[in-house]
Amino acid sequence: MAEAGTIGGSSPANSAWRDDRKMATLLPPRKLPADSRYAELINSRQKTLGSLDLAAQVRLPTGCSEEEWLAFNTVDLFNELNLLAGAVSDICTEQTCATMSAGSYAWQWADGDKVKTPQQLSAPKYTEKLLVWVESQLADETFLPVQPGQPFPPNFKKGIKVIYKRLFRIYAHVFHNHFKAMAECDADAHLNHSFKHFVYFVKEFDLVEDSELEPMAELINLLMRKRAQEAHQQGVPETG
Ligand SMILES: [Zn+2]
């Protein structure tokens, strides 16, 4: 097998990781239909890709409804975590990670619907159940409407918040247990960038309680301080 050009070399960490892992998402990536109510957002993202800083990228675009913006970005962030789960699938196993934990924090699986009694699962099983559950939420058009004019349900933001609270745990587990291994294959820059995007989005729309973010509080505080400094330097009023 040719090794040249896979890791290191001139590729930024981001693309090295993506090439190396062959976009191996755990579940099939989720796509919003290009001819749906999200067509304009899909289009404008393609145009601005990479040209905006993260703080600007997460901000609600003028004229866009908050619900559509949350829906659109949640599909993206689901795919991002789906990719991360695929990337760690050979280092996060039943043997290495018997519990879904992050430092002194640990979670048992319950979706509050089909599984009401919390189940003790390994990290890979927990992650898979979690992603399958999120996927089922995103695929439910009564929760996340795709057709123009179809209303969002009254519990939409509440449901979105549960999704973010749970998705966060994948980052928390990977940072606490697999950061070193990710750094060894040059994936740490991508992981940091991906988490920063997630945190900015969560903070912009107040999606997760601070108490839930506790396992990553130190890094989150650092990221938010940096964001405030950058906003100050650019003269942008701070939001959130
Ligand atoms: Zn693990």
Image (cartoon, grey):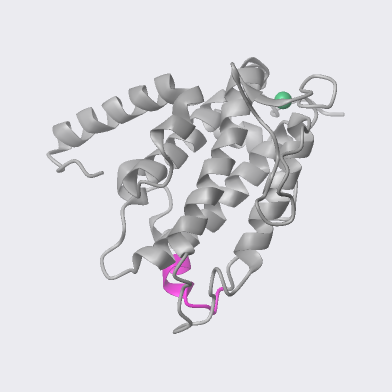
| 128 horizontally vs 15: left or right | right
Q: What residue do we see at 53% from left, 49% from top?
A: 162
Q: Nearer the viewer, residue 162 or 114?
A: 114
Q: Quadrant of residue 32?
A: bottom right
Q: Is residue 234 above or below residue 100?
A: below
Q: Residue furthest right?
A: 1
Q: Position of residue 95 (x, y in %)?
A: 85, 21
| 40 horizontally vs 177: left or right | left
Q: Quadrant of the N terminus?
A: top right
Q: Quadrant of the C terminus?
A: top left
Q: Is residue 206 above or below residue 142?
A: above
Q: Residue furthest bottom?
A: 149
Of the four image quadrants, the one with ligand 1 is: top right
Q: Position of residue 129 (x, y in %)?
A: 74, 46
Residue 54 appears in the picture as rendered: yes
Q: Is residue 40 magenta?
A: yes
Please report the bounds of the magenta region as a residue range. 34-44
Q: Is residue 6 above or below residue 239?
A: above
Q: Position of residue 59 (x, y in %)?
A: 31, 52
Residue 187 appears in the picture as rendered: no
